[in-house]
Each structure stands twice: as C-alpha cells, then as structure tokens.
Image (cartoon, rainbow, N blue to C red):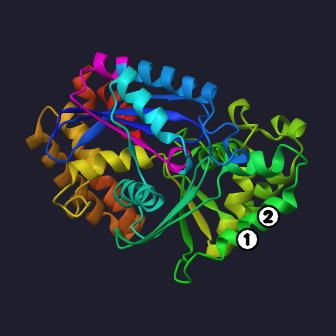
Amino acid sequence: MAKITSVIDIGSNSVRMAIFRKTSRFAFHLIYEVKSKVRISEGCYESGGILGEVPMERAICALKEFVQISKAHKSRKTFCVATSALRDAPNARVFLERARRECGLSIKVIDGKKEALYGGIACANLLHYKDGITIDIGGGSTECALIEDGKIIDLISLNVGTIRLKELFFDKENNIQGAITFIQEQLKSIPSHFKHERVFGVGGTIRALSKMIMKHKKYPIAEVHGYEIDVAQNLKFFEKVSHASLDKLADIGVPPDRIDNIRSGALILQMFLTHFNAKDIITSGVGVREGVYLSDLLRGHKNTFPKAFNPSISAIEDRFMLDKKYAEMTRRESLKIFDTLFPMHKLDEQCKKLLNTASYLSSIGRILNFYNADKHGSYFLLN
C-alpha cells in the first residue's frame, strides 16, 4: 500500500478529501483534511436528478484544487468515490468525463450498499464499541450498517437525505408533515432485524448536533469523535431543531454552515432513532473516506484489524516512542501499583485498561522536549 494515500468523497452536499500517512503495517494517521461545500445536487431533486451546469462547475473547481493539494503532500495513491447525487443523475457520465479530462481523476460511483459498507467499516474499526447500527445521513440518502461483534451483518440505503428533503419539502412551503410522511414510507423498507439500542452517528448533521449538545453541557473535551448522547434526553432537542423557523436556528446554536439543511437532518435523525428503538448515539468523526482507506489497508483481513490491535496507539508509538523498554517497564510497574492498591481505590477494569495505555505511552512527550515532557505527553494522549 502507498505510504501516503488520498481519499476524495463526492457527496450531494460537499466534496471532501482526507490524506492519510501509513506508519507501519496497520497503523496510520490523518495528515490533511479539506472540505468544499459545492452542493453538486443543487436543484436536481426537482428535475429528475439531472445535475446542473453551475453545480458541476463548482465541483470540478474543487476537485482541481484537491488534486493539487494531494500532489503537494506527495500522495502516491488516490481513491475518488461519488455517492447519491451522481448515482441518481441521468447525466452523471458528463461530469465523470469532465473530471477525468480536466482533473485526471477516475471517479467510482458507488451504490448505496457500498456506501453503507464503507461507513460500517470505519465505525466498526475506529470507535470504542463493536455492536450497533450506523446512521450515515447524507445530502441525498441515508445509509445504515448493522454491526455485531465488529462484523458487518447487513446493509441498507434509503433515498432520504438532507438536501433531498430540503428541496422537496422545506424550501417551498416548509412542509414538515410532507417530509415526515416521506421518511415514514422509506422506513417501511427497513428489515425488521435492524434494531439496536446503540447507534453510531455518521455525517455532518449528527456532528453538528453533537457539538451543540457538548457546548450546552459544557463538555470539557473538544473532540466530537466518540461523544455519547442519551437519546431520551435529547429527542425533544432534535424535534425543536427540525421544527424551528429558519430565522430562529442561529439563536439555538446552529452553526452558519448548517442552517440551511440542519432541520431536515434533525428530522431524519429523530425518526430513524425512534424506528431503531435506540437509547444511545455514539458520535463518529469517521465515515466513508476512512472506510475507503481501511478497505484497502485491511484487504485480505476481512476489513478488520488484528485482535486487540489499536491503530491510534500504534500510530502514536510509531511516531513518538523513543524507548520501548522504558515504556514497558513503566506500564508493568504502574499495573502492579494498581493491583496492590485495589482494596483502597476499587476502580473497575476500564480504569485499568486506560492506565495500561497511558502508562505505556507516558514518555512520548520527550520527543518534543525533556522539560515539561509530562505536559507534552498529556496533550498527545488526550488528543
């Protein structure tokens, strides 16, 4: 596999690129990420899916810039996938040819189940739970993967997305009831075994809603990936967002770049959560791009990392570890102290697991400077 790999995802709302550097056989880290809100699907849901000239031009301009950025990072391999808007478009071939000719990109238009698979691979490998259902809300469609014990059991894709609902129901008469009916009809096609108390929330809508909840609760860590949301406590909030008038969204904390499509996204989310009988949302900072990368990295390994392998820890170890013997000694002695003092602290196995990792990596701050190495290391580990 190429040491530096770029993955471009052309969605209905945005075009995004992530660039990854491989540090060892299975370890990697993100070195660059960029997004351009080109909205290639603009106006297409009212015109039989046909892509407009202006949106296509915006997307081509973004792709040209992304290719330049990829080359500047010396990327040796580029994957480019397109989802709902292009797979629905009768004139998709026109855009694909332009991208090949003007950008040098060979774009693979993936079907809904493949899109669901990539999101599932990312969540199954890069989140801290191994069972649940992904809800990946995009501009044109929503994908779900049923995951059990880290394995993807089933996949579905429904033609219900933020931009699709926005253009069909919210833009003209703010027809929320029409949008609800539309989603309800789509939900009927979901197999009965798609039920789980835990949902992995993928996509910009869910990340935006999570950040709003984090801010309200004064959550002390800025990282949204892995943030857990109690569904029962927040369903009313999702409903408030979906039913708010456009001019009131900023007042309830919706970021400017999400105001035009957050209502349709929140409506999709609350209805899917209710349908799945979900109790918890695990916010995912990863999705299709990471899934595409991992499907290449883990080919021949059934799309899963080796048992007990943690790619984040290994990537940190590859880049910052100076003395592995010292690290092992620190871990061994720390766990001895934990066990010896157990009658006093009575902490659970999860705390011991965290100590196991933190003690092993505790010296990585020295890579920056010996002085204040503990503070440097603490910052590395927190991130």
Residue range corresponding to the magenta coloring: 68-87
Give, as a three-letter code, the residue at label 2.
Ile
The residue at which mark 2 appears reads as 180
Looking at the image, which residue is at 48% across and 33% down?
95
How many numbered markers are drawn? 2
From this view, report whether residue 261 is shown above or below residue 159.
Answer: above
The residue at which mark 1 appears reads as 184
Q: Is 76 contained in the magenta span? A: yes
Residue in the foreground of this view, choosing between 7 and 340: 7
Q: Are marks 2 and 1 in contact (CB under 8 Å)?
A: yes
The 10 Å Cα crowd at callout 2, few under 14, some 14 to 19, many 20 or more, is some
Mark-to-mark CA distance, 2 and 1: 6 Å
Q: Position of residue 218 (x, y in %)?
A: 67, 43
The 10 Å Cα crowd at callout 1, few under 14, some 14 to 19, many 20 or more, is some
From this view, report whether residue 102 is shown above or below residue 300.
Answer: above
Helix, strand or loop at disc 1? Answer: helix
Looking at the image, which residue is at 62% across and 39% down?
41
- Give the quadrant of residue 321: top left
Give, as a three-letter code, the residue at label 1.
Gln
From this view, report whether residue 252 is shown above or below residue 291.
Answer: above
Residue in the foreground of this view, choosing between 377 and 94: 94
Looking at the image, which residue is at 23% across and 58% down?
305
Q: Which mark is residue 61?
A: none
Report if residue 319 is visible in the image: yes
- Give the quadrant of residue 190: bottom right
Q: Position of residue 240 (x, y in %)?
A: 83, 54
Q: Position of residue 210 (x, y in %)?
A: 63, 48
Residue in the foreground of this view, choosing between 205 and 321: 205
Residue in the foreground of this view, choosing between 68 and 345: 68
